[in-house]
Image (cartoon, grey):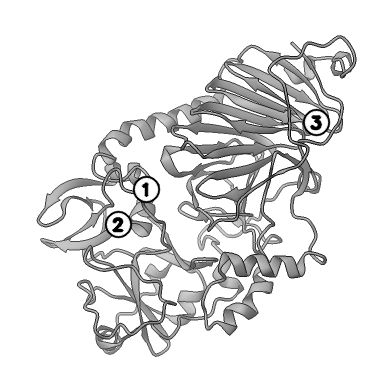
Amino acid sequence: MLSSLNRANLPRLGFAVIFFAFGLLNPHLLPAQERYPAVARISFVSGPVSYSRGDDPDEWDDAIENVPLTIGDRIYSPEGGRAEVQLSSGNFVRLAPRSYFTTLNLGDDIKQFYLGEGAASFNIKRLQPDEVIEIDTPNVSVTLDEPGTYRIAVDEDGNSRIIVRRGRVMVAASGRQIAVENSEIRVYGIDSPRYEIVGLPASDAFDRWASERDDRFERSYSDAYRYASDDIIGVEDLSEYGRWEQIPDYGYAWTPTRVAAGWVPFSDGRWFWQDPWGWTWISNQRWGWATSHYGRWTPYRSRWYWVPVRPRTRVRYVPAVVEFVRVRDHVGWFPLHPRDRYIPWWDRRDRRDITYVNRTYVTIVNQNTFISARPINKYIVRDSVIRRDANSGRFASESLPIPNRSSLRVISETAGRRSYKPSANVLNRAAVVRTAPPAPPPSFREKLPEIQKAQGKPIEPSQGLALTSAADKARPERVRIRPAAEAESLSIQI
């Protein structure tokens, strides 16, 4: 245990120490290329877990499943809370109780996170040749070099433990780095870190829980990804809640088996605002991530079937595979059919001549319900006149409602707001990074005038960067950054 060691006896650089597998780091931060951000998914929540958006950092809400995570977003699991974050390619991050986790960068080629306190398990099933996964802590930066099973922990003093049960990591701090395999490395101290390498510890309750979650994924993986691209996040959830059947024209498709009579896709969830995608669907159904953001829906023999993107095909995340309809002060939408092309609503082109197969399966709510991030299933409009107008109304070529602060919230309507958040001491810690993360996103308050000016069009990455640059001098740092290449003393005891 960390507490059983006499840390003062760990040698510093210049004394009798043993070095191995070290290489000098570049004295400058490695720049992260600016890309359209990727999205991760909060795939499981147990107990009290909080979530804070990168563009609204002063607010903490209860985390719920199927919330999309992007750059700057944070999760905190206090005592009794656990959370799971799903990345692409079947990769997972799992958080133990008393853990604080931040997304510093999220793109196709780099996933960079900060663990300020607590413990996180990383099960990396697949890494693309040019993909980097970096986890930063208050005193060290860790790069996962290959698929494997890893655990990183940070104690109340900011000391780090990196456990490598399978795979290989590069641990960097103070201008040097070390490779670690099949062992545990402990890093003590912030300004002048000292290291030691020990054998693998026995598994604890958190390890066993993470392993159980991995086993669940593996049991469903082979079945689900026979029919769908393994770039689709969340397909493994489908087998438990429905079945795959072959249907005419589209081959194997999935149909849910635990839905109410008359159910239609996108009728059980909520809309919330997230740049740069705009209005984004959060499904209340555990299986609803994949079927909301990828593929298409088609009715067949009184059932709904989800037609996925097929195996070995690259996919693109969209905020919701729907088309919108405006009816006076109401907003409606319906699921896109396999014959329909996804066109963002703000791409204002004349759609009057487009025939949508699922046009008559529209779900309608009042505009106030739409923009307030409420679960819409309680507020669906049944009025026959409004529904008739929606079936013959115009598509949302003009604009959708402008978001407000309530459009950012994902507060549970039943549990109330608990607002757990990390201590000020944890929030004020600096992250030791090897790769320079992008600037945090501009706040919603800074973005709102531009959204209004563009009649509801979301803020694109280049616009967000310009807004961030303009406000940099006045904005306090959300996560302070310290390069791993800074020259400080470093020592290791083996």
Q: For the residue carrying disc 2, how many other residues have a C-alpha within 10 Å: few (<14), some (14-19), or many (20+)? A: many
Q: Horizontal and vertical percent for residue 87? A: 48, 44
Instruction: Give the amino acid at mark 2.
Output: Gly
Residue at the image point whose x is 67% and y is 69% from the top: 466
Q: In the image shown, does 421 or 19 lie closer to the viewer? A: 19
The kind of residue tagged 1 is Ile
Quarter of the rendering containing residue 475? bottom right
Residue that badge 1 annotates: 232
Crowding at dot 3, Cα within 10 Å, few <14 / some 14-19 / many 20+, comes out as many
Q: Which numbered disc covers residue 174? A: 3
Mark 2: which secondary structure?
A: loop
Q: Name the residue under label 2.
A: 295
Left or right: 97, with 372 as reference point: right
205 horizontally vs 355: left or right: right
Give the foreground label among 3 and 1.
3
Q: Do callouts 1 and 2 mark residues in contact (Cβ within 8 Å)?
A: yes
Where the N terminus falls, by quadrant? top right
Q: Is residue 81 above or below residue 379?
A: above
Q: Which residue is drawn at 46% across and 75% down?
A: 370
Q: Residue at x 59, y 28 (%)?
A: 151
